[in-house]
Amino acid sequence: MSPSTSPRFFTEREVARHCTKDSCWVLLGTRVYDVTNFLRMHPGGEALILRRSGKDISREIEGPPHRHSENARRWMEQYYIGELDRNSGSEEAQTLRERRNGYSHTEENSSQKLSEEEDSMYNRCSPVDLDNDLVDWRKPLAWQVGHLREKYDAWVHQPVDRPIRLFGNSFLEAGTKTSWYWVPIVWMPLVIYLSWYCYATLAKGVSRIEVTSDLSIPVHKSIFPVLFLLGWFLWSFIEYCIHRFVFHMKPPAHNYYLITIHFLLHGQHHKSPFDGSRLVFPPGLASFVVGLFYVFLMSVLPDIIAMSVFVGGLCGYVVYDMIHYYLHYGSPKKGSYLYSLKAYHVKHHFEHQRSGFGITTTFWDHPFNTLIPDEKF
């Protein structure tokens, strides 16, 4: 709802009707929010919100057990749709008011939906004041963010639920977007083929590691799973380092180009964390990282050993991208590993941007002292 639009008013009965996955409303005091589109994004799972649908969630927002961050509160405002009318009076008065807002007391099937005409009066996810924001959202953002200078860091860590356009050129823009399924489609055939190749080569029994000119150690085929897992483990460390030291570098406020590069690499993801087209790496961009990983291993290890470690790391990358997508859009079962990982990652986005750099695992956050404090959701 834009600042110039008068707020809509709803009765308590109207709000209480919206208690399903298809239409879920909640209250913060007298403010009404349509959080339907947020259900599957919620780190605590959609059931926690559905149980409180139609009710005031002020106590849950303030905590305990979890006091929501300022970014979480700001994010909530994107779903604001109107105000609660506590002085609605009798049931007859409520019915008249509901009809004025587009409802019919006798039409039960339509009672949970606004009419198309009234629905167009506001945007349920209108997260940005186009006239007052630091950038012009009606234009591509890539060349604007560098001008934010010292304001960039705070701006980029105030997430919005709005798609981002980076470039005016349609070809460049399309190259920055990727559907999640392209990651396994492109990379898993290579993982399967190289795994078979490495195992078959080792099974010939001719692979050896040269220790000295007079001493070599045979490499048995049974060592392949160990090398594969070693590559996966090595990737988890690379994943952590890239996320922490590259994606979360703090570009100098005076450097337009570093700010722009940071935004293109990762800043745009923190600004719009639920843009489904930019949650995984485009294969073209990922190939540079994969290629560097391959060249490094081939330069320090014997060929077949390097290839075996490489394919494990490549598989780790595919799993990383799939898990990252799922952490934003999946609804893991409460108490599961992915449930805790989703809560951990969402806290990284909304409250702890300088810690919590592990995606598929929190393992590396422990030795590097970047672990997000444990907190119940």
Image (cartoon, helix red, strand yellow):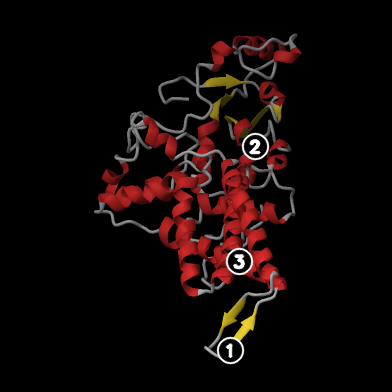
Tag 1 residue: 215
Q: Quadrant of residue 144?
A: top left
Name the residue: 72% across, 11% down: 105
Residue 285 placement (x, y as % from top left)? 44, 48
Q: Nearer the viewer, mark 3 or mark 1?
A: 1
Q: Earlier in the sequence, mark 3 or mark 2?
A: 2
Q: Quadrant of residue 42?
A: top right
Q: Earlier in the sequence, mark 1 or mark 2?
A: 2
Horizontal side of 249 relative to 1 (left or right) equals: left
Tag 3 residue: 308
Tag 2 residue: 39
Q: Nearer the viewer, mark 1 or mark 2?
A: 1
Disc 1 + disc 2, Cβ < 8 Å: no
Residue 46: tell me if it is visible: yes
Q: Nearer the viewer, mark 3 or mark 2?
A: 3
Q: Earlier in the sequence, mark 3 or mark 1?
A: 1
Image position of 224 with respect to 256: above or below: below
Q: Nearer the viewer, residue 51 or 85?
A: 51
Query: In the image, what residue type sits under mark 3?
Result: Ser
Horizontal side of 23 relative to 359 (left or right) equals: right
Farthest-out residue, left: 254
Name the residue: 50% across, 21% down: 122
